[in-house]
Image (cartoon, helix red, strand yellow):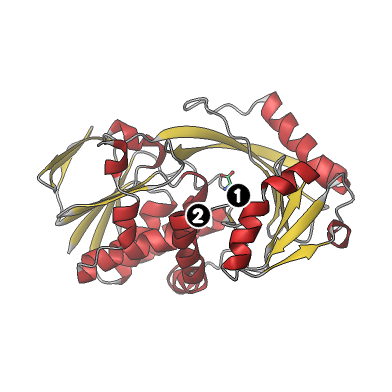
Amino acid sequence: MEVLIVGSGVIGLSVAFELAQAGHKVKIVTRNYEEGASWVAGGMLAPFSEGLVGDELKLSLESLSLYPEFLEKLADVSKIHPFFDDGGILRVFISEEEREEFSDRIETYKEMGIPFSEADPKDYGISGDVHSAVLFEREGNVDSEKLMDALLFACENLRMEIAMDDVTKVKIEEGQVKEVRGFKGTYGADFYVFCPGAWTGAIFEAPVYPIKGQILKLKGVEPEKVLYSSVAYIIPKEGYFLIGATSEDAGFDTRPTAEGVNNLLSGALRVFPSLKDAEFLGVKVGFRPATPDGKPIFEAGENYALLAGHYRNGILWAPVSAKMVLDLVEKGQRSEFFEVFGRKRFGN
Ligand code: GLY
């Protein structure tokens, strides 16, 4: 089948990779394969630390279980093994009140049999002013930049065509895509997959908007595990670590700011003071594709799928998003998540 994919963030590329591997002829149209959220993402696979419950948790658990095999397949084709640590994340609570607020989540996870343990912050070199910590053993951490590199290399090795264009119009009638138009021309295919990230609202009637995130890159003294706190998260990678991330309703403002950097550094130093000697490498800015209820938007039509609004969890939900489209295209199987996270909930 000929498939056209609009968008080249982690979702678009993951879908492209799975479909091309299954033998489909895939073409990607992207306005800029370097912008968006994926290159800037912290890469934490952290549904419990994020406090997800219900259908979002179900989606996350499915994606988490797909991750190791997804990365293996990707490494086979791209020859790149992105850094991946599935040794858990330490959810750090700054105060008793914060811990108390999270207690209903802890109860839910306990009832579900999610493995976690109480952790002594000192055992993890946390000398900062914190109340307590919980180790969520099934959480993980992947290097998003390397993951994006691997996906792009895989797409190239699978002989995929990537066209640079800004898609400005998608005409859908009775559940069928009739026309996809960009600045440079129109695009035809047997099946269309739309993954336009924070720019979804420009081509679909869908309430997706950018939430700016600034993230810092440093090198040197770092914690042995990801430390996830409300004031900052510190994410060790291979050869560097990240401090993330601001959450700003500032449109598509690409500027790193003094306040953003200051908040992240002071938050991280409060939790893990020994990083004061780390070398500062830089700041990156990205745009999470947010929705009013913070949940994704999935839609499956006759000849198309829309995957949008991954908000804080694009890296985590990439494998399951790709599988949903693969099952749809290959087997005509419509995942329950298309219903659960449908656009109709917003009256569109
Ligand atoms: N997933 C973490 C963030 O969006 O900041």
* Cβ of mark 2 under 8 A from ligand 1: yes
| Residue at the image point whose x is 87% and y is 44% from the top | 129
Q: How many marks?
A: 2
Q: Position of residue 125 (x, y in %)?
A: 87, 57
Q: Amino acid at mark 1?
A: Gly
Between the C-alphas of marks 1 and 2, the distance is 9 Å
- Relative to 248, residue 5 above or below: below
Residue, disc 1: 42
Q: Amino acid at mark 2?
A: Ile
Residue, disc 2: 315
* Cβ of mark 1 under 8 A from ligand 1: yes
Whichever of labels 1 and 2 marks the residue nearer the N terminus, that label is 1
| Residue at the image point whose x is 72% and y is 63% from the top | 135
Please say if the residues under marks 1 and 2 sit with CB atoms less than 8 Å apart. Answer: yes
- Report if residue 278 is visible in the image: no
| Disc 1 secondary structure class | loop
